[in-house]
Image: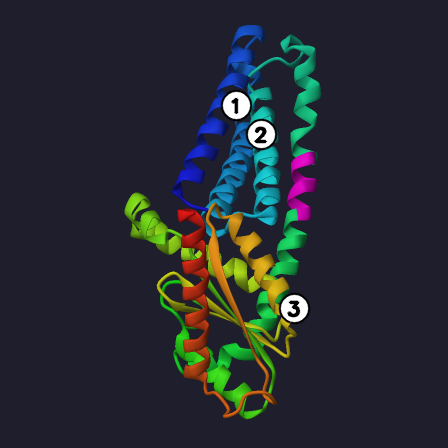
């Protein structure tokens, strides 16, 4: 999700933890030193550190989206519950405000329930990704047709698959997604953040597709999606869905769509001609958008 989101989460947790500690210091009594159990402190502290570590890993590894937000909310709730349990080890319970004991009971169960739901949905996402990998990974890994940055297939892979489908006379839908103003993102946030965004977009696109579909990084900030045996209506519906999904990552994408009907192409087009046609459609989309802005 990017370094900025990690800083925001760290700031929010720091403020919350500080407020809870301040309440305890102002309204509660510290336990006598003899009553403090070092083993309990070590246990509660370790659980808190684990919860915060999991939260950092999710923030670093997951793109923004519904599932990621559930995981983050769950881990924040769990960590907050662990922190409040840790405070119990230093302060006398009876001296704490009445609302504190009620609040203390809520974060951990709510956090664990939310985390469980997020993990379940993550599992469903991963099943989709794994299905795609099982059907194609062996060939593409062996032939090194994988993009270095995003770890999805590159333009050579899409050309190979297009050639196979053309030979088999399969009907196809082809989408091109071009990230708007990506150069500005690189300039303002740096190339590393730009690469992270591309990787997150690639992962997001892969989770939205059917097992028989293929997404690749075509060039720079452009992605091509191959939709075998897809109708024109389905291709346009998928294009809209993918554009909406990308908005969750705080960016937008232009999208071009073409259909290849094997029984209508005379003479038959090859993979390079189809990609050239798709590029032409993308130029039309961008030109139309520019004309709208000018008018």
Kindly report the distance in space between the C-alpha atoms of the residues bearing marks 1 and 3.
47 Å
- Which sits earlier in the primary sequence, circle 1 or circle 2? 1
Write the start and end of the magenta stretch as one range.
110-117
Can you identify the residue that label 2 sits on? 80
Question: Is residue 145 visible from the viewing direction of this image?
Answer: no
Residue 16 - label: 1
Q: Are marks 1 and 2 in contact (CB under 8 Å)?
A: yes
Can you identify the residue that label 3 sits on? 234
Q: Residue at x 46, y 78 (%)?
A: 158
Q: In which image quadrant can residue 87 be found?
A: top right
> How far across and how far down the image is residue 205, in percent?
53, 61
Of the two numbered discs 1 and 2 in the rendering, the one whose residue sits closer to the viewer = 1
Q: Are marks 3 and 2 in contact (CB under 8 Å)?
A: no
Q: Secondary structure at mark 3?
A: helix
Residue 41 - label: none
> How far across and how far down the image is residue 258, in percent?
53, 73
Q: Pick the residue in front: 27 or 30.
A: 27
Q: Residue at x 51, y 91 (%)?
A: 268
Kindly report the distance in space between the C-alpha atoms of the residues bearing marks 3 and 2.
45 Å
Of the two numbered discs 3 and 2 in the rendering, the one whose residue sits closer to the viewer = 3
> How far across and how far down the image is residue 147, in percent?
39, 69
Q: Is residue 240 magenta-colored?
A: no
Q: Pick the residue in front: 111 or 262.
A: 262
């Amino acid at each position: 999700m990017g370094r900025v989101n990690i800083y925001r989460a760290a700031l929010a947790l720091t403020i919350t933890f500080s407020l809870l500690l301040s309440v305890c210091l102002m309204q509660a009594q510290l336990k006598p030193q003899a009553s403090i159990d070092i083993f309990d402190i070590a246990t509660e502290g370790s659980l808190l550190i684990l919860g915060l570590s999991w939260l950092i890993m999710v923030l670093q590894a997951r793109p923004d989206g519904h599932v990621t937000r559930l995981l983050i909310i769950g881990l924040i709730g769990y960590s907050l519950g662990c922190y409040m349990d840790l405070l119990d080890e230093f302060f006398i319970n009876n001296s704490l405000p009445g609302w504190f004991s009620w609040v203390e009971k809520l974060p951990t169960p709510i956090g664990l329930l939310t985390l469980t739901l997020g993990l379940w949905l993550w599992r469903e996402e991963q099943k989709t990704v794994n299905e795609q990998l099982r059907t194609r990974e062996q060939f593409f890994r062996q032939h090194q047709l994988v993009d270095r940055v995003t770890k999805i297939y590159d333009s050579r892979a899409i050309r190979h698959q297009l050639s196979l489908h053309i030979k088999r006379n399969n009907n196809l839908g082809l989408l091109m997604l071009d990230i708007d103003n990506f150069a500005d993102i690189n300039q303002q946030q740096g190339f590393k953040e730009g690469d992270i965004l591309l990787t997150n977009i690639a992962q997001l696109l892969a989770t939205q597709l059917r097992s028989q579909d293929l997404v690749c990084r075509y060039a720079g900030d452009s992605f091509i999606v191959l939709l075998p045996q897809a109708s024109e209506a389905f291709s346009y519906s998928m294009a809209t869905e993918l554009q909406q999904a990308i908005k969750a990552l705080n960016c937008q994408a232009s999208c071009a769509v073409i259909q290849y009907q094997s029984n209508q192409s005379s003479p038959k087009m090859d993979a390079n001609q189809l990609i050239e046609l798709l590029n032409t459609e993308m130029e039309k989309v961008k030109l139309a958008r520019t004309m709208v802005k000018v008018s």
